[in-house]
Image: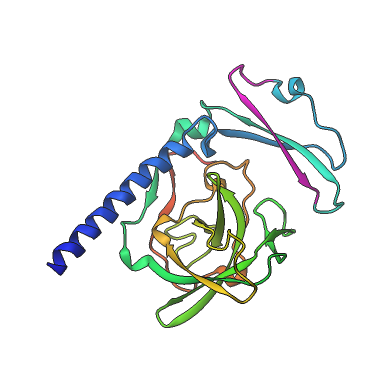
Amino acid sequence: MGSTVESTTHDEAIAAYEVWKTHRRAAVTAPLGNLALVLTHWSPAGAPAVSDEEARAGQPADAVLTRLRRTDIDSGEPQEGYRIWRADSPANAAFEEIESYDYDPAWVLSGRFELVDEQRVVPFEHIKDDGATRALPVSGDLVFELDGTEYRFAAFDTNHDGHSSLQLVFGDATNGRESYGAGRFLFLDHPGASGELAPGESLPIEIDFNRAIVPPCGFSNQMNCPLPPLQNRLPVPLRAGEKRVRFSEGFSI
């Protein structure tokens, strides 16, 4: 009986993984999905935002304009930006699939989220910032064990799909060989979102690396993704989740 239950649970997990992959494909190919981004533009620090007319110049009527704002790394001044999205983007037309590993229950790990300091920030390099770093809020660490070795990864606080989440930016020995070269992302429900934890306290958390994804910059060169800090890099191959994006022959972002 035990083996039957175990087999059923495994089959259900595989089915859920296939559903997740279908949802991921729908998300990246959506009108505002990663593949649709054709332009990201930033005005000089402190300068006013450009008009809608100027931003849309040369774009088709059905292109979507969205606005951005950030703090300039060098001056600390506010910086206005915008993005142009097109459902008929070259990347969308050339997209074939997100290559992924088979579901592997061995990569569903039991760990803990340990609150360090609600005000802590950690510098993350970004792929387009030429080595400069942006401080992101990291209130706690993900602690887990793999093959007898304990790892402590920094996962920053974010909002993902309307939920308070942890975003793990990590690297492993498959990067550049089997998986996307700049690392991968994993989003987890934030176990400390209720604010009940005190620094040093922890809560159990399930870390399912089968849900690891290719970052947005793997779909569009107009994205600027954080890179894995040194402490978030596994020295071993992590063969779970998404590998990389496959486009039609001859196309490159």
Residue 52: x and y, percent?
74, 23
- Residue 175 is one of the magenta-drawn residues: no
Q: Nearer the viewer, residue 245 or 190?
A: 190
Can residue 210 be seen here?
yes
Nearest to the observer: residue 173 or residue 231: 231
Tell me, yes or no, if residue 96 can be seen here.
no
Residue 2 pos. (x, y %) = 16, 69
Q: Give percent across and percent down for residue 186.
A: 50, 57
Q: Indicate left or right for 79 with 173 as reference.
A: right
Residue 67 vs 181, above or below: the answer is: above
Q: Quadrant of the N terminus?
A: bottom left
Question: Going 71% across and 66% down the picture, which residue do you hit?
Answer: 120
Q: Quadrant of residue 208?
A: bottom left
- Which residue lies most toward the front here? 196
Res. 98 image quadrant: top left
Quadrant containing the C terminus is: top right
Magenta stretch bounds: 58-72
The image shows residue 81, relative to residue 115, as above or below, that is above
Q: How is the image coloured?
A: rainbow
Nearest the viewer among 206 and 180 is 206
> Residue 48's spot in the image, x, y percent?
85, 33
Q: Is residue 170 left or right of residue 82?
A: left
Residue at 63% across, 40% down: 222
236 above or below 209?
Answer: below
- From this view, report whether residue 217 is shown above or below residue 63: below
Q: Is residue 67 magenta?
A: yes
| Corner quadrant of residue 106 | bottom left
Say which residue appears at 44% left-offset and 72% top-offset: 236
Q: Residue furthest left?
A: 1
